[in-house]
Image: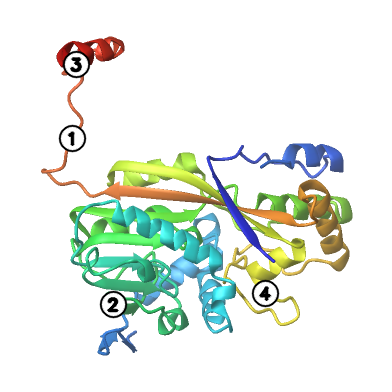
Amino acid sequence: MRSASCSDGPSSPWELVPFACPLMRAAALLRGPGSLLLRASSGCWCRRFWAASGEAAAAAASPGSGARSPFDRQLKRKQKNWAALQPEPAKYDYLREEVGGRVADRVFDITRTFPLALDVGCGSGYIAQYLNKETVEKLFQVDMAENALKNTMETEIPTVSVVADEEFLPFKEDTFDLVVSSLSLHWVNDLPRAFREIHQVLKPDGVFIGAMFGGETLYELRCSLQLAELEREGGFSPHVSPFTDVTDLGHLLGRAGFNTLTVDTDEIQVNYPGMFEVMEDLQGKYIFHKQRMGESNCSWNRKPILHRETMLAAAAIYQEMYGSNDGSVPATFQIYYMIGWKFQESQARPAQRGSATVSFGDLAKINALISREKK
């Protein structure tokens, strides 16, 4: 059985361990916290747009593009399509539904109605299911996996489904009042471009509210696999995809043109019987290679196989380093939540430096002033 808990705040950063390090020294260092038609929900047909020209899409997905394109986007599309067709999706979508609800809560914190909204990387509609007509009047749902859009959850908001890549949004400038995204942007090859695309389709005074996995996600699994490979094979390969660091996120949003930024972190910890159950949820059953969450590694430099001895050693290390008294092991998911606004003249601006009329030193006297006024 899985159980989940959460806590606020980021964990310590990862350290790179040389291959030549002894196993226990490594453990000490690594230990750390075209166009088709799709039916819209209103019953009418909507258009499926190509996200980019063939040349641009091919360039973004090319394995020869090196560090500029760390992920195989075509493979990720297949993984998400496979995951959308699996039975009992709610059994594996618990994390996406939880984070989608928290993104929706941040939408509700803004006391206005959004006539037109966009959900980037919507999946099966993990955010839309929590929204209502009083907050969002119409919602466009965009995802690269058509099977996910065919199996979206019911919502009271009129929706339109569009198959497109998150990096190439097929909408005109200044179109949407609100853009949301939950646990999708960590798979894009060009995150700065994705932020610029989102900023471009927002209307002035529009807001972007998103969530993505942080750099400390699955650090227990990453550490266990690396230590096992160091011991059994003399080196390690990346088995967990790279994530963005929180210190970079604010800079990327600012460079894209967003202002009045808010970035905060959260951690959700899920308990599993063992490491193999963690990997089954993320990747699926090893025999059938079914992608349950659709979160399998799609890096170009991923290692195609893990040897049986290495897997057994990793499971033992996982249990020894992170196991609880009841025999379960934790899997930590670090979540970054971000809010950014597109500039408009009517927005509130910070006061000019030196324009304050009250000193912070006077705050200590506030109780005395209040008491004097009451008399």
Q: Indicate the secondary structure of the residue bearing disc 3.
A: loop
Name the residue rendered at 30%, 48% in the picture.
340
Q: Indicate the secondary structure of the residue bearing disc 4.
A: loop
Marks 3 and 1: CB-CB under 8 Å? Answer: no
Residue closer to the observer: 12 or 242:
12
Q: Indicate the secondary structure of the residue bearing disc 1.
A: loop
Which sits earlier in the primary sequence, circle 4 or circle 2?
2
Which residue reaches farthest left? 346
Look at label 2 and name its amino acid: Thr
Residue bearing mark 2: 159
Q: Indicate the secondary structure of the residue bearing disc 2.
A: strand
As drawn, is 34 to the left or to the right of 84? left
Which sits earlier in the primary sequence, circle 3 or circle 1?
1
Q: How many marks?
A: 4
To which quarter of the image does residue 349 belong? Answer: top left
Marks 4 and 1: CB-CB under 8 Å? Answer: no
Name the residue rendered at 54%, 67% in the picture.
94
To which quarter of the image does residue 179 belong? Answer: bottom left
Residue closer to the observer: 7 or 353:
7
Which residue reaches farthest front? 375
Could one spot residue 303 in this view of the protein? no
Q: Which mark is residue 284?
A: 4
Residue bearing mark 3: 354
Q: Give the CA separation, mark 3 to mark 2.
A: 48 Å
Q: Give the CA separation, mark 4 to mark 2.
A: 30 Å
Residue bearing mark 1: 349
Look at label 4 and name its amino acid: Gly
